[in-house]
Amino acid sequence: MSMKTLFITDLKNGDKFMDEPFLLRDVISRTTKDGQPFLRLVLSDKTGQVNGVYWDVPAQVQRWVSAGQVALVEGRVSTYRNAPQVVVTDLSAHANPDMRDFLRTSGRSREEMIAELHEEIESLNAPWQELLRHILLDEAFLPRFADAPAARRMHHAYMGGLLAHTLSMVRLAHALAAHYPYVNRDLLVSGVLLHDMGKVFEYGTDAGISVSDDGHLVGHIVRGVIIVEKAAAELDDFPADALQQLVHLIASHHGQMEWGAPVTPKTLEAILLHQIDLLDSRVQGFLDFLSEDAGNDTWSQKPSPMFGSYLQRPPNFAPNEA
């Protein structure tokens, strides 16, 4: 297995390299004016991405190359339209890459987030604590939950993003449960901790973040409901009314049917969960977009797909801290 020694942030104009692994985030086939095939590429790793171009593409490369693969790249760094570009001279397939080199990870340490998850579960009262332990602290499930992304793009689209998103939402849940009357804190926190756990099965990270067969055929909402109902059945006498309330939170957290929710929120905790999820995904989506947007100008170089407009960077914005 070829080890990665050069990262996107290390690239300088004039650099040459060979057999260096990069994730092909985008692959677009084009034809020159005289009919010769070439590729427009986006090469990426955990530190960022850079555009690339591959002229005179051999037929054998055209047969296998596609977005989402890790390839061994030979090329040199040049400048095109005032931005770095890799002129690729050879591509070959790369078997068994270590995806931690190619996918962004959460800015928080995995161990720190797992410890916080334990603390949140231990803060719950019966019957919630036992159920949450049974599901989230399962020795086979927990490592996957800690490494999973929360999305393919838009927000928390990196390894550990699901747990980072979940814990951020929990902090908001505590604040809102203290602020508003009549909120069942344990139900709300349990719903937050479990609402997206089906994404462990919805996304794969073997070659970039991709949607699995389970994601296409079942989806994370339905998968989450299945997991909760199965876990509750495995416990002794988990209250039926509590289970129904929790299932409603998971089923309705997208808020609207046109956004994929089987039902709309109909309880106080379900309304809060949906709004917390929306708030955290939008704010982190704003920060993630600006972190990945090249340039240091006040405004982003391109419109945000999430917000449909150019975004203004906050004063003293530091991408590594977003």
Image (cartoon, helix red, strand yellow):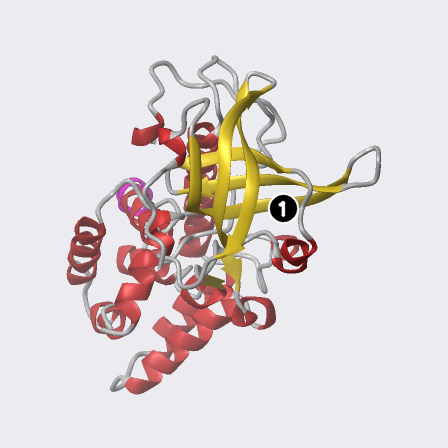
Count of residue discs: 1
User: Could you tell me which secondary element the residue under label 1 belongs to?
Assistant: strand
Let me know if residue 290 appears in the view: yes
Q: Is residue 177 magenta?
A: yes
| Image quadrant assignment for residue 284 | top left
| Image quadrant assignment for residue 147 | bottom left
Q: Toward the viewer: 202 or 263?
A: 202
Return the x and y of residue 137 as percentages of the image width and height.
23, 69
Return the x and y of residue 313 as percentages of the image width and height.
44, 19
The residue lying at 46 percent from left, 63 percent from top is 204
The residue lying at 60 percent from left, 40 percent from top is 41
Taking the view exactly as shown, the residue that stands out farthest to the right is 34
Residue labelled with disc 1: 27
Q: Quadrant of the C terminus?
A: top left
Q: Magenta region, mostly helix, strand or loop?
A: helix
Return the x and y of residue 211 as percentages of the image width and height.
54, 61
- 316 relative to 231, above or below: above
Let me know if residue 69 appears in the view: no
The residue lying at 49 percent from left, 42 percent from top is 74
Q: Quadrant of the N terminus?
A: bottom left
- 184 relative to 130, above or below: above
Q: Toward the viewer: 158 or 87?
A: 87
- 64 relative to 45, above or below: below
Q: Amino acid at mark 1?
A: Val
Does residue 314 appear left or right of residue 163 in this picture? right
Does residue 86 appear left or right of residue 239 in this picture? right
Q: Toward the viewer: 39 or 42?
A: 39
Crowd tier of the residue under label 1, counting other residues whose Cα lies within 10 Å: few below 14, some 14–19, many 20 or above? some
Does residue 152 appear left or right of residue 192 in this picture? right
Return the x and y of residue 197 as percentages of the image width and height.
39, 63
Q: Which residues are magenta?
A: 173-181
